[in-house]
Image (cartoon, rainbow, N blue to C red):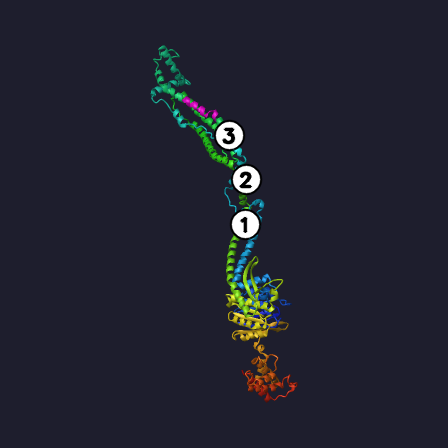
Amino acid sequence: MLTHINLVRNVGRFDSVSAGANLPFQKFTVLYGENGRGKTTLSAILKSLATNDPLLIEQRHRLGAQHPPHVVVARSANQHVFQNGGWSASDDRIVVFDDDFVAQNVCSGIEIASEHCKNLHELIIGARGVALNETLQQHIREIEEHNAEIRKLGGNIPASVRGAMNVDQFCALEKRDDIDAAIAETERKINAAKASDEVQKRESFKNFALPEFDIDGLNGLLSRGLPELEAEAAQRVRDHLSHAGRNAETWVAEGLPRVAAMAEATDRNDCPFCAQSLDASPVIRHYQAYFSDAYAKLREDVTEAGKALTRDFGGDIAAAYERAIAAISESRNFWGRFADIPEQEFDTAATVRALNAAREAVRQQLLAKHAAPFEIAPLSEETLNAIGAYDALRQQHIEAMRVYEEANAKIALIKEQAATSNLSALQTDLDNLKRIKVRHSDPYDEICRKYLEAAAKKQKTERARDAAREALNQYQQQVFPRYEAAINTYLGKFHAGYRLGSVSSRNTRSGATCDYKVLINNVPVSLSANAGPSFRNTLSAGDRNTLALAFFFASLEQDSDLASKIVVIDDPMTSLDEHRSLTTRQEIIALTGRVTQVIVMSHEKPFLCGLWEAASRINRAAIMVMRNGDGSTLAEWNVNDDCITEHDRRHRLVAEFLNSYSATQERNVAVALRHILEAFVRVAYPEHFPPGSMLGPFVDKSRQRIGEQNEILSKADTVELRAILDYANKFHHDTNPAYETEQINDTELESFARRTLAFTKRT
């Protein structure tokens, strides 16, 4: 509860409120102030505290004041201080009804603008709805920020890069780890499609196999001998031939057939060279055993092996190999335009050299075997090394040829695709692949990453916006029908003569707004028509202020946290007709029991007096804004003095005179008697004594009706009233021109004073 206004310095008419700093505010507080004294300034201060809007105070900076505004408002044990352009803490539990409320939520003068409907929407939906709407609007603002960022990032990706794609499509392109290979493959397909005729005519790779040395076969041949030959004979032949010179074994092997031929011809076993008999020769028998058919067969096999070596590893093979490799290289250059065929290395010169070296090494060993067939001499380490060097190159050749043989499957597919390919579709595929590569390359990879992050944030915010809008819509569907019923109830209480219809919420691009219709005699009246009946020409100022007051009370009705609110009402009777004054007082008094505190400000004393008399005598306070030099200050207001009517004052004057005689008051008491009688009769007999009537004619009428059914006063009362009136008329200007000098007898005055009070107590 607001307990004190401790300080108001340099605001409006207030230079420094300090004398009224200790004036306590109570649960129900009335604050009186003449127009222009500063009452509305206090209302603005409380609204500033409620809304945390410093402009409401800054705009009222006291003219001519050197120092800035300074305000201290106490609430229970806490203080709210406005200094240096801001509050130490705001208090949103304060709600204020004032002229600004009307201007913001109902109309400005006679006009209703879109802002009025938006503000009214917030008023209707209350704190909870405002929070829901603010959440929605915050999401909408965030989406606009996302859109701005997305547009900025998208602008960094020119159309020349995106092609026919928009930014979303471009940034959505998925990364491919094989993008370079895919681009190359598609380019090759395009090349194949363009060269379709040539592709169909070109042959695939043909295999060429380098010969392989049969090391086991050669070693078997070179290790063959004559196992059945006696070792002694063989040794003697070798020993003998070792002294016979070069190629002796061949010479002997070729000569033995001549010995046999000569013996057959001459029937003698003579040496064909010296013609001496060989019968006595110690080695001839061993020669014949050594150079047997097996010997001849072995030499023949060696000879055949030599021929095979020449045939399989001769010069034609090397030439054919070089031609084949040249053809393969040329084919690879051709097919490499259309397929990924790794180029293979063929060192033809090294291979030919290795082949020739291995062949020559084997040939030399075959020649040696041929010269001495029974000599056991398998392939030497040198020969094996030569064969190994060649075989290593041959294995490389085999691996390389395997690659090309496998490429033949690709070539077959290329031929098939080239025959049926769509060049335009392939070009489109290539363009898309190139865009994928550009998309995931600098600088567009980073730009798209930020773009997609911004788009994802936007989608997330859009989901939150949709959820917030749905929550607000559901809340609006609940609160607006209740509000329409509540406001029409208050309009009925205020005797408005019109009601509202179709009170509803509508979402616009700039935010939620409120729509409603004014129904007069059940006929809708336009809110803003330029011609014909409309709000501006059918509702009076009092009607518009009544509508605002109904809006205010209806909004309080919907507040789920109403019990914690401090309600400040500034001049609720502005432009209101008199017949609405009672209802307004009743609603304010009823509100007092439902909120933490009610503060009513007005320049109309009768209205505040009526409130004061109707309010509970417990926890109420009355304060006034009064002149203080050329400014204003706060002071205690004695409501009772200002609430006493002239009739009350006269009645009290007479009563006090009877209780305590005062010679100075005799004439005032004598003058007051007739006024007391007139006031009593007007209240007691209004149908017989309307305003403007005189007591004399009223007494005459009463006398005429004594004893009749329409009797007004009894005979005794009529006589008494006539007697008192005759005395009172002596002191009234209408009946006695010398009333001011009429002599007064104190005893007589006292008697008629008592009789007057006694008569006016009758019912």
Say whether residue 334 is magenta: no
The residue wearing badge 3 is 327
Label 2 and label 3: CA atoms lie apart by: 33 Å
The mark nearer the N terminus, 3 or 1, is 3
Q: Secondary structure at mark 2?
A: helix
At label 1, counting other C-alpha atoms closer than 10 Å, the crowd grade (few under 14, some 14-19, many 20 or more) is many
Residue sitting nearer the eye, 593 or 116: 116
Question: Which range of residues does the magenta coloring cover?
Answer: 302-317
Q: Amino acid at mark 1?
A: Tyr
Residue 424 is tagged as 2
Residue 342 shows in the view: no
Residue 511 is tagged as none
The residue wearing badge 1 is 451
Residue 227 shows in the view: yes
Is residue 691 found left or right of 477 in the rendered image? right
Label 3 and label 1: CA atoms lie apart by: 53 Å
Q: Secondary structure at mark 3?
A: helix
Q: Secondary structure at mark 1?
A: helix
Counting the numbered discs, the total is: 3
Q: Is residue 190 above or below residue 744?
A: above
The reply to whether the C-beta atoms of the residues labelled 1 and 2 are less than 8 Å apart is no
The mark nearer the N terminus, 1 or 2, is 2
